[in-house]
Amino acid sequence: MKAKELLSRYRQGERNFREVDLRGELLRGMNLAGIDLSGANLMKTDLRGTQFTDAKLAGAQFCESSTGTRRRWSVLVILLALALSGLAASLTGIFVAFFLIAIIEPSQATFSDNESAEVIAGTAGLGVIAIALYFNYRQGLLATLGAVAFAGAGDSSNVLLIVALTVAMVLLITFLNFIISRRALSGDPRDKPIRDLAVGLSSLGGTSFRGADLTDANFSEATVKSAHFKGAQLTRTCFHLSKKLHLSRAYQTSLANRTALNLLVSLRPEPKKSYVGLNLKGANLSNAQLADINLTEADLSEATLEGADMQRANLTKVQALGTCFHQTDLNAACLEAWNIDSTTQLAGTICEHIYLLQNQQERRPSSGTFAPGEFTKLFEEVLNTIDLIFRDGIDWRAFLQTFQNIQVQHEGANLEIQSIENKGDGVMVVRLNANPEADKSTIHQAFKQQYQKALKAVERKYKALLQSKEQEIQHKEALIDLHRQQSADMTLITKSLAERPVTVDVNATAKSEAMQGNDQSQSVTVGGDFNINADNSIVSLRDTSGQVSNQINQLGGSETQAQLKDLLTQLQSAIETEPALSKDEKADALEEVKTIAEAGQLAEATRGQKRAKRAMNALKGMTTGLTETTKLVEVCGRLLPMIRLLFGL
């Protein structure tokens, strides 16, 4: 299609020109706002001054095309710049001369002939010079003529000296301003206001992509200057080897950062450049050479890294939601706590092994290399889990408080503790199960923030305890001694009951039907704490529930015991009301709960841990035969990990 035909049909109200071929056409200065050119071939086209505001340009090819301003606008900008430069140059020259006259020959100053006039004149001259040094691009002949004319009017014997110094000063200012202008256009952050002003003025009459959809568009080797990208959708837009892209207006896009822009153009990291935390959301880094790059905490969401070389790259805490890693070489990369979801494309990734922690720790696989498809399978589990990494150990009180709060705040995520791993050197990893639909990034961030707050609160409590009075400490020691004595007394009572003789009363009832061959039924009542059927099986422990409640109620001497008391009370209630358990099974399970409560009161931490661990393993074993939908299975899955935390297991 020819440009004239396109413009004619556009003016008649037609907007759909998808996949049209406009290669090499002259579209300069056309207003094509809102047009649909998705997938169109616009290679080698002249787009200077063209208006694509709110246009649909997804997948369009702009390779080797040219954007920029029309000639008339360029002339206006140049004339404006020359006028401003000339004015600034003249004023600078005049004030430089005025400053020199005030210093060298105060009698020629227009102010009164006193010391204050010299100071005022000198200060004013220095102020203007400082402003000129920063804002002027060039100083020209006008500055020198102005200085000479002003100096000559003074009719002083020092005229030649003043003229010489004025010319030297103006030349120095010219040189410095030239350096500043070059530095500003190169992207130096110190000169950002100058650069933004220059780029903003030029883009006003340039190619406009404001609000346009440029998803998957291709600007490879195009000259992209004086273009306006504000509000444009630049997801996976390719700018490889494009020219003068830094001279375009790209506020509120990934191109606004010069480091990101250079990476998108060259597809190679710059030496000694930091890419930590860089915003590369939606970036097109296909076939990029990114080996050994450190992208810690960078945002790569919706980006494409297809075919990129990312060997040994550090992707710690990278946001990779919806990111394409097809044919990406991730061999030996660090993927610690990276955030991926079901939209992350891992199929076809090239990878022999990776590391789950920095400094080449936690190699996967532990030895050898991944078989085809194993890398993707490894992270299928990760998609449904949240890894919480603690590098200085875990304060279990702060952890448990935070975990319970997060469970309530994100109830729909069905958070559960899957595993707790001690990696050594103080590094602990707690893995949480979550629904696939859960916002894992938000949960992870919320947990980190709330844990730090809880940690500070716990530290304040520790300090308060350390500053408590000696009488309080002695009182607690007395309570511990009393508890030990009570435990010893309970042991003696239990032993005494065990040695007590058992009286058995047997009542047999034989009905007339028994004489006719019917089955006989016997009921045996045993004195003591047991009820027995005819088959001699234990049905229940009469006072077990009460004993468990009594043992649980003895907890509460500390915050940890109070938390344990609450959890065991919930567990006891679940066991007693579980219809899937027989009376015998309920009695056995309650005995294990009682053991855990007793372990929570022991002064010796190690001994208590062992007893509690055995009891919890027994409880877990009792639920093995039950279906996953059984209430007790759900309760044990939720409560037992938290009880383990309280015991430091």
Image (cartoon, helix red, strand yellow):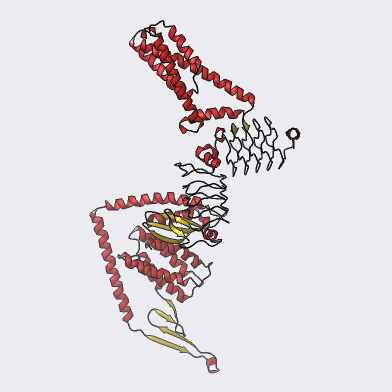
Task: Give above or below for 205 relative to 325.
Answer: above
Task: Give above or below for 466 relative to 24.
Answer: below
Residue at 49 percent across and 67 percent down: it is 633
Task: Give above or below for 175 relative to 287.
Answer: above
Q: Nearer the viewer, residue 516 or 476?
A: 476
Quadrant hosting residue 31: top right
Residue at the far top in the pictured view: 155
Q: Nearer the viewer, residue 334 or 368?
A: 368
**Rendering coords of residue 383 (x, y %):** 53, 57
Locate the N terminus and report the quarter of the image it occupies. top right
Answer yes or no: is residue 146 visible.
yes
**Rendering coords of residue 448 (x, y %):** 43, 50
Quadrant hosting residue 230: top right
**Rendering coords of residue 628 (x, y %):** 53, 67
**Rendering coords of residue 315 (x, y %):** 48, 50
Q: Horizontal placement of 472 versus 220: left or right?
A: left
Answer yes or no: is residue 90 visible.
no
Locate the C terminus and report the quarter of the image it occupies. bottom left
Number of marks? 0
Q: Nearer the viewer, residue 339 or 308?
A: 308
Residue at the far bottom in the pictured view: 515
